[in-house]
Image (tube, rainbow, N blue to C red):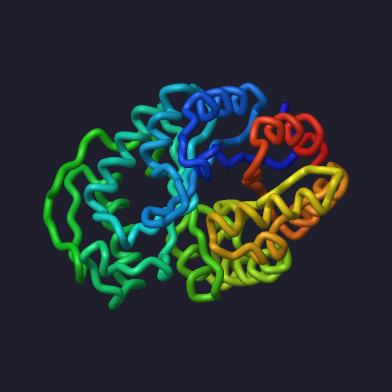
Amino acid sequence: MATGRIPCGIAIPQTFPSGTVDMQLIREFAQKAEQYGYEGLWTMEQIVSPAPILEPLSLLTYLSAVTSRIRLGVSVMLTVLRNPVQLAKLISSMDQMSQGRIAVGVGIGGHVPESIFGLSSEQRSRRFVEGINVMKALWTQPQATVDGQFWKFEKIGMEPKPIQKPHPPIWFGARVPVALKRAVRHGDAWMGAGSSSSEDFFQQSATVRQLLAEAGRDPATFTFSKRVYVAIDNDRDRAERRLREWFAMYYRNADMGSRVSIWGSRQECLDKLAALVQAGAQHLMLNPVFDQMEHLTVLAEEVVLRL
């Protein structure tokens, strides 16, 4: 069972390089992950991309119907590309349908041109924060009132509210100090990006701890996490090659796979994951990108229990 000292979620199969979506794989993976005791099933978002990837929230809605206990999360959505009123309704409905299992990962983006969504890139940071506040207001106020720069309304009701109170936890994806500061100010958790290295996490987590102290915020109210691309294979060269192939497909950057991933034998992967925990990670989101069912079992039975 994947119930070691550190809660570990796992990425659901979401990209299908062949172009054929395997719903049977998704269902079996989700149900087996729940049986193993993983903390959560996690998705990611890439709306416009040549990579064949399913939309995260609709996938989580499906997963809520085929599981009953495991947490369901997205890390992260680029919320500046979505209308926060509609998004608040969608997430509230998802939280109801899943019986309070949704975790909401948010990020500011910048690598996707807003123009194709009919939006301007100007004042992206302000829109990002204001959109989050709009969702919180609709989730928590019986009759929500917002007086912002981009959204203004009075006494707007939205029912049903989410099951989780005061609202589903908001997990921030962030790298640079100003973004990490937003995470501490507005979020419940921070997840280091999968496209960042362990060394990046060591530095960023130290910054987050400093920001929590400066804000006078109890660290116990804030979760540190890291998405980790991982490949277990005693043939290290083969593991790296397969990681690089996936990164070339998804990120258009094979070298990133070598820079940010953890791969090798069970013991080598365990040691490198343990280093993240030693640096302050309180949660890990494990992200195999090939042989997902095999990784699901090996990670649960031989790695997570030993963290």
Q: Residue at x 43, y 28 (%)?
A: 64
Inspect this view and state whether residue 79 appears: yes
Residue 180: % across, % down: 53, 68
235 sits to left or right of 156: right
Residue 6: % across, % down: 71, 42
Q: Residue at x 46, y 65 (%)?
A: 185
Q: Residue at x 29, y 52 (%)?
A: 135
6 in relation to 219, above or below: above
User: Which is more toward the observer, 157 or 89?
Assistant: 89
167 in relation to 51, above or below: above
User: Which is more toward the observer, 138 or 296?
Assistant: 296
Residue most extreme to the front: 18
Q: If the image is split into quadrants, where does the N terminus sit?
A: top right
Residue 238: % across, % down: 78, 49
Q: Residue at x 49, y 63 (%)?
A: 183
Q: Quadrant of residue 164?
A: top left
